[in-house]
Image (cartoon, helix red, strand yellow):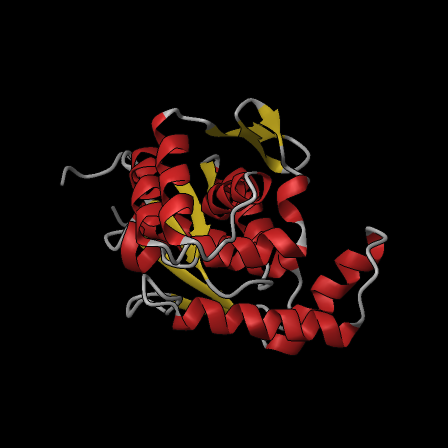
Amino acid sequence: MPKRARVLVAIDGPAGAGKSTVARRVAERLDMVLVDTGALYRCVALAASRAGLAFSDEEPVGALAARLAEARAIRLEADKERGVRALLEGEDVSIAIRTPEMSLGASQVSAIPRVRDALLAMQRQAGEKGGVVLEGRDIGTVVFPDAEVKFFLTASPEERATRRHLELVQKGTPASFQETLADVVKRDKADTERPVAPLRQADDAIVIDSGGKSIEDVVDEMVRLVSQREAER
């Protein structure tokens, strides 16, 4: 494979570790393009829900994902406030895909081989020339195993549940901490035990525990390491 013009940054890790926020700020600081892979799967989950399909119904959900990919019906655009705006068949669904239901739905549909096949090419096209930041569950292990810089961003389930619960409270969404923690644990189990591309740390990934650290501390650390890698090229 030809050498990329700039490095490709892969950020993997469990739900609630802060990947989306960190990836957006790292991309901004390094003047790179952000590719929110999780948003792609959330869009498929939303489309499946709207079509009355169960997230676990492999054949129809897989066919739906293939149709959406072929029609280029899912698009991600830069957004100054949110970092990324998600469009599903021309509709801005950036808020609709961020509910707890769509979070769990994304985990389920992403375990369907045909869904992954449909969206894999889309992700690779976005990052083939480098100069991009991608975040998800399997970027450094499956999508771009040759990424020049790989991070595995993590935190304890309790830490991640605390953050998620605060987000829900601020949005006016009723949920107890114990319910939120149970959702986090359930999501972790689904992500790590799924038969297709389970969540795991790449052997050459740099592990960063965000517990007890501010977002800016994590971003500063990642930017420093990426800049160092680019200077070595």
Residue 183: x, y in percent? Answer: 64, 69
Is 49 placed left or right of 10 in the picture? right
Q: What count of labels does the image hold?
A: 0
User: Which picture quadrant has residue 70?
Assistant: top left
Is 69 placed left or right of 117 in the picture? right
Residue 212: x, y in percent? Answer: 66, 73
User: Which picture quadrant has residue 72?
Assistant: top left
Query: Is residue 224 visible in the rendered structure shown here?
Result: no
Residue 90: x, y in percent? Answer: 56, 22
Query: Is residue 144 visible in the rendered structure shown here?
Result: yes
Q: Please say if 72 is above or below 11.
A: above
Write the residue at 57% across / 60% down. 218
Q: Please say if 16 is above or below 87.
A: below
Write the residue at 75% across / 77% down. 178
In-front residue for pair 216/48: 48
Is 211 placed left or right of 193 in the picture? right
